[in-house]
Amino acid sequence: MPRLRHVGPTHARTPLSARFALLVLGALFLLRAGPVLAQAQVEAAVDVDRLSTDQRLTLTLRIRGAGELTPPDMDAVAGFEVVGSSSASQYSLGSGGFESTNILTYQLRPTQLGELTIGPLELVADGQTLRTPGITVTVVPGRQPTVDPAARAPAPGGPLPVSPPGSSPSGDNPSPDQPYTLSAEAGPLNPYVGEQVAYTLRVFQWSETGVRARYQAPDFAGFWNASPEPERSQNIRDQGGRPARVTEFRSLLFPTRTGALAIEAAGLTVPASFWGAGFNVASEPITLDVRPLPEGAPAEFDGAVGRYSISAQADAAEVAAGEPLRLVVTVAGQGNIETLPEPHWPQLPAGWRWIPGQSNAQQEAKGGVVNGSRSIERFVVPAAAGAAEIPSIPFAYFEPGLERYQVARTAPIAVNVLPRADGAPVETASGATVAETAAAVDWQAPGQLSLGPLTASSPLAQAAAAAYGAGDRVAAAAALEVLLQDGPGSRAERALAQRGLGQALAAQGAGQRGRARLAWERAQRLTPRDPGLQADLQSLVAGLPDAARSDGVGLPAVLQRSRGWLTDRELGLAAAALMALALVLALAGRRRVALWDAALLTALLAAAVLGLGGLRRWEDRFHPRALVLRPEAPLLTAPGPAAQVDALTTLPEGLPVRLGDHRAGYVQVEVPGLELSGWLAEGDAEAVSRSGG
């Protein structure tokens, strides 16, 4: 009879699946600990190497291993016009660690014939200049003319696009052997800049062709097209005793510049079929004489043209002092609603303030008129308790029909301001309580810079300390900026230089507080637990506007708070130590269940620490935190000069933002906590991670 051998409890051995999980975690850690960044590389490709002037070409740039990226100047691409662009980011985990890929896509329209070369294009990735190879494509004639974009519209009476012999652009004088004729009109022919212009193309069909013709609208260069899909209607008319099917295409336009402005020829393409060869028919171009707006505009005028009304509504009749009251202002009427400026916000009572909110527009182009409304959300924060009112809000516009400026106004809104909900003293007429006046003391400049041992090892640090002691804080900041560009050796020295730079900037007062906060946050990333640095930073932030004091809520706020706990290097070391401890506990836990459970918990904690470090690096690379450096920086609706693009609001210095796409000298930003996004000029905000972190 065989003997049985006792093997003991089944939990004395480590499960195979659990050991496999530990091996996977260890492998992930080794990948994470390996090299993360590689030298940036760029690849360029086009979707076609031969096209006609009727087609578009797609240029794709793939940039691998880049963090900070400055796109190429596409205006330098000769023979092409950029008609669209987009960007995307990808990241993956490979044998060399995390790899990022930025993808820039451009839609190009040819403006010349022959063999054209795209590039070489230059772009900057992490301070490194990358160059694409030149790509040669061949452009052949198509239906569209190939002229320079600035002169694409034909001159009045000039040659028309290709048409069959005997065709006529006038529908009132049909050719007996031509199945289609076109007639275009626009009105008014002498509009003011920003005034609505109705463009109508009539297609007269005199006989059946058996195929469907395709309408090609003009590009409307120099106009804002309020109807990308033109309004269409069709009927049967008797033209000179001969019936015709007449199809009308109506587009509503707004001229954006003054002087002679041409609407180029519209076209109709009839494809080849069993009944005959294909051909093109074109209308005549139309030239408008656009007038500038007259003199005598009111102070509140900001460019609105049309006929409008304005109303305002508060969401409550009572509000506690210091609490925001939501106000929705609606501008409605006829005109270019999508580009309407904001109203002229009046001066509030002493101590009150405006906080910007969201804005949205609804527009409809129908029946020959563009109607709609734009709603602007604003928050009003009252100061003192008692009866008060929100002043009347004016909106100035130029009405072309009357040829004069008008000012519409909202009615004042009465508000009953209650004492502060937290029982704090009510503010005085000057906008501050006695207690608050005592507490609201700006950051106090120290007698000397906190440069520590850096002054003994660096002549620039010595010069900065001497200049600061002599009262020349600008020279002190300049010396420390040069020192940081040269690059102090150790992390501790860089932190000292950044802290001293922040002190020299903050001591200069308003206008430099954003740069001071930037320097101190960079120092915090190097020495996060420095109590003196934390005190300086907290004191400075407390003196900034409310919107600039936090990063909102959610993951970005958690990641920012974690910057005050551990550096990225310390997070990596902590994850390594925890992983090593988990492996030791797992080996010892082969005979003790409690140790095995501790190993699993330690491994999970290591994974959490590793994940926090990965999220911080991901944020720095793909959606970096930045600070507004310029006081009252205009937040624009689109990239472009502030004189040509509407501003959503202005952002205070020191405000935290998140950076997005870069385009033509502008950067897209998002303001945490306010659900507000727009475009800033590059230089108005700078990423904290750009240096020193």
Image (cartoon, grey):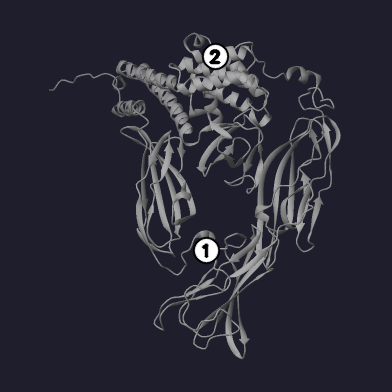
Q: Residues within 10 Å of mark 2 (few under 14, many from 20)?
A: some
Using the image, determine if residue 494 lies above or below residue 221. above
Is residue 201 shown to the viewer in this render? yes
Residue 297 place in picture, x, y as percent? 78, 51
* Gap in angstroms between the C-alphas marked 1 and 2: 60 Å
Residue 564: in sight, yes or no? no
Q: Which residue is mark 1?
A: 152
**Element type at mark 1:** loop
Examine the image and state in which quarter residue 589 appears: top left
Furthest-left residue in view?
A: 1
- Neighbor class of circle 1 (other Cα within 10 Å; few <14, some 14-19, many 20+) is some
Residue 585 percent location from the top left of the image: 34, 17
Viewer-proximal residue among 633 and 561:
633
Quarter assignment of residue 440: top right
For the point 62% across and 31% down, which residue is it? Answer: 655
Which numbered tag is attached to residue 463? 2
Quarter the N terminus occupies:
top left
Q: Which of the two residues, 98 or 585, is positioned nearer the viewer here? A: 98
Residue at the far right in the pictured view: 387
Give the residue type that dot 1 points to. Arg
SS at badge 2 = helix
Relative to 120, residue 264 above or below: below
310 vs 5, left or right, is right
Disc 2 residue type (three-letter):
Ala
